[in-house]
């Protein structure tokens, strides 16, 4: 809409935000259920990389037993940070908790970006980096990953860096392509001196992580979440391991009561259930390998190797969107992509063995009918 066609109120809105495209989040379960007329409990939701087993029992118990919902939460999330110190081995002074890692991403961008600064986005990747970057006036420079396996080509990234490049986001394992960033690549990026943000939302499923490098590099931030393995996506909790020089400024700009009482209690209890967490990582990883093998057997589909809790799958014969819609009618939800470098493809979260079996039956019925 041109500026002259805006109402008086619309004319007051920031012009850049007015022209923004909306961030498309996944549809909530109740909405999906209403739209397709299948009860929520019967829906197989494989579109948001959530934990199909739900939260650890101790986390649910902690929410039930909490007595102080009428008080504001601890702005420092102290008990949770103490438990995170034990869990991660990093000093709590370097740990900040957020309302999901999404909030931490936003805080980082607010802290580093003055409008006109540059942020490097290694596409295709998680959409929030570009979205938040634009919102805070960054010039978001998209550097493409290699088209065959979506690995990062360090030479292209180094060539893209300018004086005003402040931040580089590295999602590892990458969403939606499920591949990790090799440590040698990360080191090359760290050597540039730019602030490197490694988003480890899915590190539990990868068997390796980069947190130890934060002892070596003062320009590395590692972000994690309770939304995936811990099954607490609905409560919104994430944390980051930050350099001391950065975290002291983040404390100044965060909203005081950013993490709710329920979220702090549940996340803390969940960390104490190490065995439950490990058992569920193992289940999901085993199921991922089974799903990968089964998808590979289907003509026209090319699943890519995954070190995460989802599988990215190219569709070579047939229409990925039509397949997604057909699955929806049968109560199964997956994520469809049709963007540059992600043409005619979908991403399937790893579910329970029963969910995989139903998914595969329905996929076969759709593809071979
Ligand atoms: C790579 C990545 N980072 C961050 C997030 C957001 O996590 P949270 O729920 O902690 O905000 C997601 C969620 O899908 C994700 O895929």
Image (cartoon, helix red, strand yellow):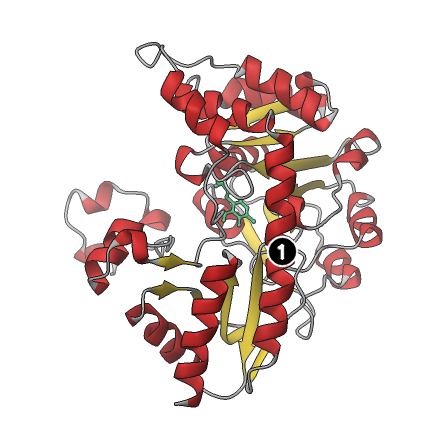
- Can you say whether 285 is above or below 279 in the image? below
Residue at the spot 20% in from the left edge and 57% down from the top edge: 34
Residue 221 found in image quarter:
top right
Residue at the spot 60% in from the left edge and 37% down from the top edge: 277
- Can residue 56 be seen at all in this image of the molecule? yes
Residue 96 found in image quarter:
top right
Q: Is residue 235 left or right of residue 8?
A: right
Q: Is mark 1 within 8 Å of ligand 1?
A: yes
- Which structural element holds mark 1? loop
Q: Nearer the viewer, residue 152 or 130?
A: 152
- Can residue 143 be seen at all in this image of the molecule? no
Q: Which residue is mark 1?
A: 174
Q: Nearer the viewer, residue 247 or 84?
A: 84
- Can you say whether 303 is above or below 240 in the image? below
Q: Position of residue 329 (x, y in %)?
A: 28, 71
Q: Position of residue 148 (x, y in %)?
A: 68, 75
Residue at the spot 39% in from the left edge and 16% down from the top edge: 65
Q: Position of residue 238 (x, y in %)?
A: 53, 33
Q: Is residue 1 left or right of residue 359?
A: left
Q: Position of residue 105 (x, y in %)?
A: 54, 38
Residue at the spot 54% in from the left edge and 28% down from the top edge: 270
Q: Is residue 296 left or right of residue 219?
A: left
């Amino acid at each position: 809409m041109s500026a002259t066609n805006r109402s008086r109120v619309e004319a007051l809105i920031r012009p850049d935000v007015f022209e923004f495209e909306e961030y498309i989040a996944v549809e909530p379960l109740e909405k999906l259920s209403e739209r397709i007329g299948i009860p929520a409990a019967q829906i197989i939701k494989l579109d948001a990389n959530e934990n199909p087993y739900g939260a650890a029992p101790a986390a649910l118990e902690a929410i039930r037993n909490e007595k102080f919902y009428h008080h504001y939460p601890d702005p420092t999330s102290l008990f949770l940070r103490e438990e995170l110190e034990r869990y991660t081995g990093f000093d709590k002074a370097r740990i900040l908790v957020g309302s999901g890692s999404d909030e931490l991403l936003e805080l980082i961008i607010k802290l580093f970006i003055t409008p006109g600064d540059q942020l490097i986005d290694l596409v295709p990747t998680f959409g929030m980096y570009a979205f938040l970057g634009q919102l805070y006036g960054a010039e978001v420079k998209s550097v493409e990953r290699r088209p065959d396996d979506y690995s990062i080509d360090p030479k292209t990234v180094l060539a893209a860096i300018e004086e005003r490049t402040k931040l580089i986001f590295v999602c590892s394992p990458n969403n939606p392509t499920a591949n990790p960033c090799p440590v040698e690549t990360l080191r090359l990026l760290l050597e540039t001196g730019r602030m490197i943000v490694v988003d480890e939302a899915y590190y539990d499923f990868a068997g390796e992580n980069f947190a130890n490098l934060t002892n070596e590099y003062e320009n590395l931030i590692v972000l994690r979440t309770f939304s995936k393995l811990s099954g607490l996506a609905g409560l919104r909790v994430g944390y980051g391991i930050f350099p001391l020089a950065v975290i002291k400024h983040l404390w100044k700009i965060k909203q005081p009561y950013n993490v709710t009482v329920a979220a702090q209690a549940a996340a803390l209890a969940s960390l104490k259930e190490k065995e439950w967490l490990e058992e569920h990582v193992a289940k999901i990883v085993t199921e991922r390998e089974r799903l990968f093998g089964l998808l590979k057997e289907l003509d026209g589909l090319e699943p890519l190797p995954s070190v995460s809790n989802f599988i990215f799958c190219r569709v070579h014969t047939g229409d990925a969107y039509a397949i997604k819609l057909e699955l929806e009618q049968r109560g199964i939800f997956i994520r469809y992509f049709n963007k540059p470098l992600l043409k005619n493809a979908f991403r399937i979260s790893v579910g329970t063995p029963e969910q995989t079996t139903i998914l595969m039956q329905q996929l076969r019925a759709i593809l071979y009918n």
